[in-house]
Amino acid sequence: MSITTSEAPKPTESARRQKTRERLMDAAFEVFSEVGIHAATVEMIAERADFTRGAFYSNFDTKEELFLALAERGNNQRLALLRQSVEHMDQILPEILGAPGAKLQPENLGLLVTSFLDQQNENSYWFLFQSELRLLAMRDPAVGSIYLEQKAAAETEFANIISAALRAVGLSSELNPLELASVLTTTYESTLQEAIMQGGPQVQKIAHELVRTKLVALITQLAR
């Protein structure tokens, strides 16, 4: 199976074609949130996007290719939000600490982590999507190869963002950036999984509370 995932349109690709791809990815995520990756069919996705099967196959060779493109887009969007928060740290810190020029203290880390988490969109469906995509990647080497490339790129960018965030608040880590990013990502995902398993109508709120507590404890131990 041949799979490509690049989001950027080719030079000959029109803005209309790119818009069609975006609508198909939006529809795919909606369908996934209702039935899951494996039950989501090309027909369901095309119908939700108000397109034909022909429109689907003129943009994606397979359903797997679409889901990988969706994963790449989602990773990029979430990393962009984090990057933007770090770039505006000089504005965020005074708001959090209540005074211009105030230095971040360990007891204020929770407020900073919360402000970062609040920038993210609904994460429970995204985590479920990623979990199912991982299973698919383990079963299909063609999917797995591209999934690992995406994962490595996302972790590298996340490591850069975390390093910039620590520098911005005058901290450093005992771990190298990639190790720290891996630890934080693993902690975040396991905590979100726990919140989803608890169920209830406020998964996002519960997840953020759990994540904030665990991440603050980790950062306090690993950063200085």
Image (cartoon, grey):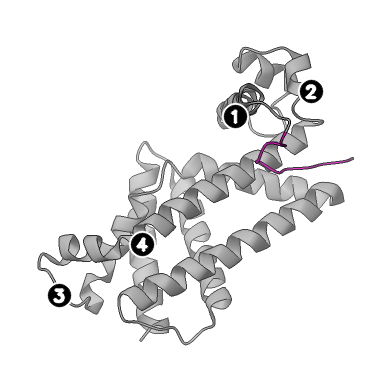
**Neighbourhood count class around disc 4 (C-alpha, 10 Å): few under 14, some 14–19, many 20 upward:** some
Place of residue 205 in the rendered image (x, y in percent of width and height, measured from the top left): 33, 47
Q: Are marks 2 and 3 in contact (CB under 8 Å)?
A: no
Q: How much space separates mark 1 and mark 3, taking CA atoms?
A: 43 Å
Q: Amino acid at mark 3?
A: Ala
Position of residue 22 in the picture relative to residue 133 (left or right): left
Q: Which residue is mark 1?
A: 22
Q: Which residue is mark 4?
A: 87
Q: Amino acid at mark 2?
A: Tyr
Q: Which residue is mark 2?
A: 57
Residue at image x 53%, y 43%?
126
Q: How much space separates mark 2 and mark 4, taking CA atoms?
A: 39 Å
Query: Is residue 8 in view?
Result: yes
Residue at image x 47%, y 60%?
188
Upstream in sequence: badge 1 or badge 3: 1
Q: Amino acid at mark 1?
A: Glu
Task: Check disc 1 and report its element: helix, strand or loop.
Answer: helix
Tag in front: 2 or 4: 4
**Neighbourhood count class around disc 3 (C-alpha, 10 Å): few under 14, some 14–19, many 20 upward:** few
Tag in front: 3 or 4: 4
Tell me: residue 45, above or below residue 9: above
Q: How much space separates mark 2 and mark 3, taking CA atoms?
A: 55 Å
Q: Amino acid at mark 4?
A: Glu
The magenta segment is 2-11
Place of residue 162 in the rendered image (x, y in percent of width and height, measured from the top left): 45, 70
Q: Are marks 4 and 1 in contact (CB under 8 Å)?
A: no
Tell me: residue 170, above or below residue 202: below
Q: How much space separates mark 4 and mark 1, taking CA atoms?
A: 27 Å
Place of residue 24 in the rendered image (x, y in percent of width and height, measured from the top left): 63, 25
Image disc number at residue 102: 3
Quarter of the rendering occupied by the C terminus: bottom left
